[in-house]
Amino acid sequence: MMIFAENELLESGREARAKARAGDSAPTTGVAEGLVQANMISVPRDWAWDVLLYAQRNPKPVPVLEVIEDGGWESTLAPGSDLRTDIPQYRIWRDGELTEEPIDAVEAWAEHPDLVTFLIGCSFTFEAGLNQAQIEIPHQTACRNVAMYRTGVDCVPAGRLRGKLVVSMRPIACDRVADAVRISGSYPSVHGAPVHIGDPDALGIRDFYAPEYGDAPLALREGQVPVFWACGVTPQAAIVDSKVPFAITHAPGCMFVTDLLNETYAV
Amino acid sequence: MMIFAENELLESGREARAKARAGDSAPTTGVAEGLVQANMISVPRDWAWDVLLYAQRNPKPVPVLEVIEDGGWESTLAPGSDLRTDIPQYRIWRDGELTEEPIDAVEAWAEHPDLVTFLIGCSFTFEAGLNQAQIEIPHQTACRNVAMYRTGVDCVPAGRLRGKLVVSMRPIACDRVADAVRISGSYPSVHGAPVHIGDPDALGIRDFYAPEYGDAPLALREGQVPVFWACGVTPQAAIVDSKVPFAITHAPGCMFVTDLLNETYAV
């Protein structure tokens, strides 16, 4: 059941989309807190089955919240929205290469009349839960983007799509790790519980202090453990690894803000 | 992460499939308790996108556990299995009409070389959790099949697929309803928490004592509330309503027994 925000909170979501539409390219961390934010990937119809099956087979990194067919750009999670303009920054991919990072996707959208667009759950939903429980999230304290890594773990392939699992990392105080597991686990359809706790090497991470996406993490403090969650950037890694001919995605950290309460996805 | 059974429990699953393969058409209620059982729907490739999208849009009644392409019949949830024979009884559908109920689907499978097969979560998983918590499930006590109803609620359409929500009903003691919600809710990918508690009329149920699928319920006793869960028979209702040209499904109550522990799907 979709639970829509009301009053000021609803306004804050509409405002966030209006700002992006007007050209503001700022990341959406902490924006309209309480509302669901979503990753986006849009591909020509010919690739839609592969993406949806990849999502079904890899539900932790690719939890699908909505699918919009036939080149549509309005999300039912945010009536009146325009997915071509309401995300702060986009990435255009051609044959698996990142070719442009425009602040709107109107022109790119017009290249293929049959786009199928996937909105995918985002960790900002469970971060709100961590904040409420007073679990410190160091990159937020430091006003940085979360560190995201390409791991050595293969996702389950689907059709022509294959790629590595991408994870986001938050250093969590040892005595709050169990709470962080419990709280994020109660949002199974937006990445859910961590996939890995501790030892980055065991996950095949190349260099802990040089993540492939987002900002480098601050130095781990004593009493902190690195906790890794499956990340919605995983489809972008699959675009690269599978040389997908054409795709439009959000830029990491620049999400689509919906009108839905995070509670929609709480178990 | 798939958690496979071991030792006797693993044997009990293999034995259940071997019995079905040998021609036993008995329902699988209470069989190999502790193992995940699954609903099945198999359609020609041309309809696979519609089914997977219908599942994505209606995750409570249609939680997809596995998709097998290209006419394949072995499930990774049960290595060595044969989906054409290991279910006790099948239903063959042509242009939305139920035409045969064979005990194996070898011939039907051979009609379309491009079948895409969907395994869908089943309420037996959370029933095991209810049993463990000593919540009485009256149809089990009476050795009957669960009552399943076609409701007045429309599922969200996808492509050419549309249909009503089908629910299963269990009368639960008033003082255990909250526990039943909590326990089933901890298995969100196998139907999860109830969709409706109390008043069958409000759900558009035609006749509480004449369900469209399964056995009629016993008379409600004082202190019991009818509790309704989304049901994996929902895709069969969509086959009828959408006049799908060809499909193979399990017969209601006759499930595919996997090698997976129910704990695989616990949050």
Image (cartoon, coloured by chain):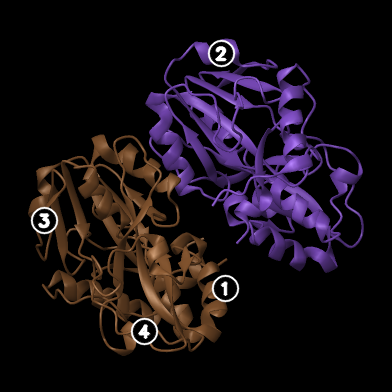
Chain colours: A brown, B purple
Contact, mark 2 vs mark 1 (Cβ under 8 Å): no
Please identify the quarter of the rendering in which residue B47 is found.
Answer: top left
Would you name the residue on which mark 1 appears? A182
On whether disc 3 and disc 2 are found on a single subunit, the reply is no
> Circle 2 — which element?
helix
At 84% across and 51% down in the image, what residue appears?
B137
Same subunit, labels 4 and 2: the answer reads: no
Quadrant including the C terminus of chain A:
bottom right
What x and y, as percent, mark residue B235?
56, 35
- Check the residue under mark 1 and report the chain it is in: A
From the image, tell me which residue sits under label 4. Answer: A220
Q: Is residue B25 left or right of residue A1?
A: right
Q: Which residue is mark 2?
A: B108
A3 vs A136: above or below: above
Task: Residue at 57%, 73% (x, y): give it.
Answer: A182
- Disc assigned to residue A106: 3
* Discs 2 and 1 share one subunit: no
